[in-house]
Image: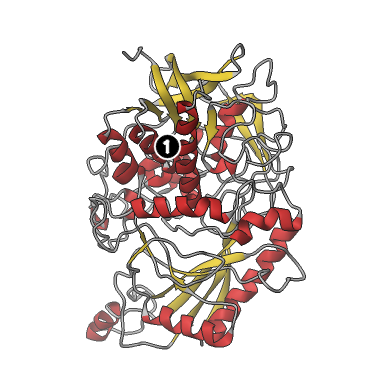
Amino acid sequence: MQKQNEYDAIVVGSGITGGWAAKELCEKGLKTLVLERGRKLEHIVDYTTANTPPWEFKHRGVATHDDRDKFPVQSRVYQFNEGTKHLWINDKENPYTVPDGQSFNWFRGDHVGGKSIMWGRHVYRWSELDFEANLMDGHGVDWPVRYKDIAPWYDYVERFIGVSGQKEGFPQIPDGQFLPPFEMTCLEKHVRASIEKNWLDRSMTIGRITNLTQNHNGRNRCLSRNLCARGCPYGAYFSSQSSTLPAATATGNLTLRPNSMVESVLYDSKNDRASGVRVIDSETKEITEFKARVIFLCAGTLASTQIMLNSANTRFSNGLANSSGELGHNLMDHHGNAGATGEFELFKNKYHSPGGPQSTYIPRFTNIKDKHPDFIRGYAYQAMGRRDGWNPGNNEPAFGKEYKDSLIKPGKWRFTMFSFGETLPNHKNHVKLNKEKTNKFGLPVLHIDMKYRENEINMRKDYLASAREIIEAAGGKNIHTIDYGMVPGAVIHEMGTARMGRDPKTSVLNKWNQCHDIKNLFITDGSFMASSACQNPSLTYMAFTARAVEYCVSEMKKGNLK
């Protein structure tokens, strides 16, 4: 009989990787406790704004000055508005610090499912090029795995979550298990043809996303409402709520506990293992300890690292399982929020509405065959060809019927590109505890020190120029580059603070996402990443999580994890 507060496994976090860890552990028969610091959020029932039309919002869906005051960081993210603000964390109650003169945007959900409700849903495989990069150019540590090790797990994850996409044979983003793709707009097809005509090393494909083009695994196909960030009542894109948590619940092995802030991992020095976690109730501040045979940290890169740092003890004085000294270091986020946009006079008799949830994708083309003189690694683009919105008539000289007719005419076709550039692992980009400032739980806040450096700055210059070049070659006019600044965290792909590697002296985790120092402690969120590539990373997180659970349970059966 199971003892109170004792489980086979504990999973910290219920987002993209926490949901996957829960599903895999529960389906393998382990009684599993999932701890989520945020509030309860039930699928469908709690998507309170999912079907709200703009006119029913007090401010027509737009974030207000009061919202920006309460959410000074969260309100910077593109998904933040009147219909989604309740899903983002309260910045004033959850502070962090940065060095003077620096910035970092730490975007966080505050509910069961985490950012899996609000994420961008693009999923691209890494290639052999990415797993070999550190070894080839000497930055960071060599990945202890290669593409062939992860490919079967990409297959496994894709078959479950449902990925719409087009097989292309691009070596830098290997093909996967795809549902039928969404269709490109006429302008997107035109730009793709132009790219393939003008460059041998560049191309464009439809975005590979977890929005379903057909019913899949009990979920309904996407209706292209473009309200994804509010939560989808049809389950038409992958989230913890729509997919992994229901699968875990169906086993009867899941216990989900919201409002549970994990303060630290408990360490059993006698047996040299993690014995459980200490939890603060987010509402009552009551402290409870839970025990388990194995623990998976999936709270998110920065949150999991904060827990590890806060779990320091007499053996690990600089953070739990940190004999290497690398815990908290090598923080990465893609650099982007920059590109170009241009107008097109084509296709005046066509209008694409509502446009669908997808964009197109231009895979990396730099430093694959030819070496760029100014930087290493590479970048990719997500791009969209759409017509501008209906003419508001603000500057129209017309009157009467002519004026009214102008209000219902769509604007010009526009092609817009945004970049995603790889950031190199760098020991100086790090996080640590700021013991001079505490949060509402009385715990030291995280101090985040990250800068983009010469390689990223040079790469940015190139992808701004290349974006303009691509649009111009396709016949675009009034081309403008877009640059919202290089603010770390802005792309929401933070990773790398508990990297995996071959050598325990230079890494925190082994190739199974298992701590070198503590064998029954696994970390499978973005913390484990040894480099960043330029692809959206969530598919890779999911694949590594499923793989880690398979290994963990196998070791438990052998008696190696007691």
Name which residue lies at 40% across and 50% down. Answer: 157
Q: Is residue 247 left or right of residue 17?
A: left
Residue 101 visible here: yes
Q: Position of residue 350 (x, y in %)?
A: 31, 84
Q: Is residue 287 left or right of residue 301?
A: left
Q: Is residue 302 left or right of residue 429?
A: left
* Closer to us: 416 or 559: 559
Name which residue lies at 34% across and 56% down. Answer: 162
Q: Number of marks in the image? A: 1
Name which residue lies at 75% across and 57% down. Answer: 137
- Mark 1: which secondary structure? helix
Residue farthest along the front direction in this orientation: 558
| Residue placed under numbered mark 1 in the picture | 21
Q: Position of residue 26 (x, y in %)?
A: 35, 32
Coloring scheme used: secondary structure
Q: Amino acid at mark 1?
A: Ala
Q: Position of residue 69 (x, y in %)?
A: 47, 42
Q: Position of residue 560 (x, y in %)?
A: 53, 25
**Taking 63 as reference, is 391 above or below it?**
below
**Quadrant where the N terminus lies?**
top left
**Taking 213 as reference, is 513 above or below it?**
above
